[in-house]
Amino acid sequence: MAETTGEDLGADRSLLLVDDDEPFLKRLAKAMERRGFEPVLAETVAAGKTIAATRPPAYAVIDLRLGDGNGLDVVETLRESRPDARIVVLTGYGAIATAVAAVKIGATDYLSKPADANDITHALLSRGDTLPPPPENPMSADRVRWEHIQRVYELCDRNVSETARRLNMHRRTLQRILAKRSPK
């Protein structure tokens, strides 16, 4: 995809970026700035909601899972303050249920991490008339399995025994999986 120009964005180029991964947040802010956006950064739900309520941006990229809560709370606040905002929800734990919830409360699109600046820009600027292209580097089956295990582990408040029970897996097997690095 070609890089955007200022005309693609319209007059209001304000962009709220909410993510608790500081290095990712800063890299994304620089990349989006090069594409003509004017990013404002927040690392928490509270900071994101404050910005969304006081200076609602035209565009937003919000991580689903943040240290102090759920990014969908920021989406709701922004949607109340600025109904025409284009909002993309990012997550490392892609699931159909969370994608549906994000779209129901007003997200324009939902992307699984790792998503690059081109994917995000395309999602922010697309008007829904065309289907997005298939990902160039889809997650491997091992990575999808690992992501699912991590999500269930987090939902069980990092309780290994409960996670193993819900996944119908032996506890020691689960401990070995959790001790390894994520697959590519």
Image (cartoon, helix red, strand yellow):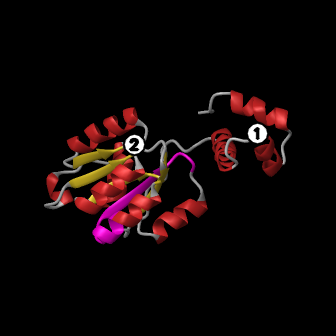
The crowd level at tag 1 (other Cα within 10 Å; few <14, some 14-19, many 20+) is some
In this view, the mark in front (2 or 1): 1
Q: Nearer the viewer, residue 106 or 45?
A: 45
Q: Position of residue 115 (x, y in %)?
A: 44, 44
Instruction: Kindly identify the amino acid type of the residue bearing the numbered disc 2.
Output: Asp
- Residue tagged by mark 1? 160
Looking at marks 2 and 1 on the same chain, the residue that comes earlier in the sequence is marked by 2
Circle number at residue 177: none
Q: Position of residue 168 (x, y in %)?
A: 84, 48
On screen, residue 134 versus residue 120, left or right, reads: right
**Element class at badge 2:** loop
Magenta-colored span: 78-93
Q: Position of residue 87 (x, y in %)?
A: 36, 60
- Residue tagged by mark 2? 116
Location of the C terminus (image quadrant): top right
Instruction: Kindly identify the amino acid type of the residue bearing the numbered disc 1.
Output: Val
Q: Indicate yes or no whether the magenta region holds residue 174.
A: no
